Image (cartoon, rainbow, N blue to C red):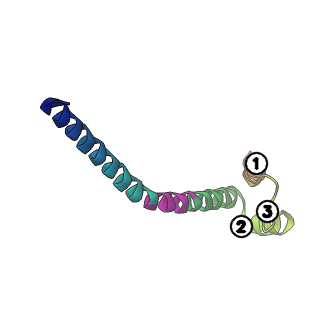
Amino acid sequence: MGLWTAIVIIVVMSLLADMYNKNQKNKARFSGNDKKINELNETIKTLEKRIENLEIIAVSDPDNFQDRARNTSYYHEPEEPARANQRLVNELARAKQGGQR
C-alpha cells in the first residue's frame, strides 16, 4: 500500500464519518418536528370541523339552527361527518334560496 492510497483511504473515511454525523444530527433535529406536525394535523382537523359547523350556522336562521342542532346527530359522531355537514349546508342553502324567491 502506497502513501497515496493511505491518504485516499483516510480522506474517504473522514468524509464518510462526517456524512454519518450530519445524518444523525438531521435525524435528531427532524424527530422533534414529527410531534409538531402531528399536533398541527390535529389542529387542522379540529378547525375543519369548526368551519363546517360555521357554514351550517351561516346559511341557516338562528331559530332554525337551534331546532336543527337538536334533531341531527350534531353531538354524536356520524359515519362521515364531512359528508353529513355538507348535505346539511346544501339543504339549508336551498331552503334559504327558496325563501328569498
Q: Is residue 18 magenta?
A: no
**Residue 23 x, y percent position in the rendering:** 36, 49
The alpha-carbon separation of the residues under discs 1 and 2 comes to: 22 Å
**Residue 99 x, y percent position in the rendering:** 76, 51
Tag of residue 15: none
The alpha-carbon separation of the residues under discs 2 and 3 comes to: 23 Å
Q: Which residue is mark 1?
A: 83
**Residue in the image at 66% along x and 56% along y:** 52
Q: Which residues are magenta?
A: 32-41
The alpha-carbon separation of the residues under discs 1 and 3 comes to: 12 Å
**Residue in the image at 25% along x and 41% along y:** 15
Q: Nearer the viewer, residue 5 or 79?
A: 5
| Residue at the right extreme of this rendering | 71
Q: Nearer the viewer, residue 11 or 95?
A: 11
Image: 18 above or below 41: above
Q: Which residue is mark 2?
A: 62
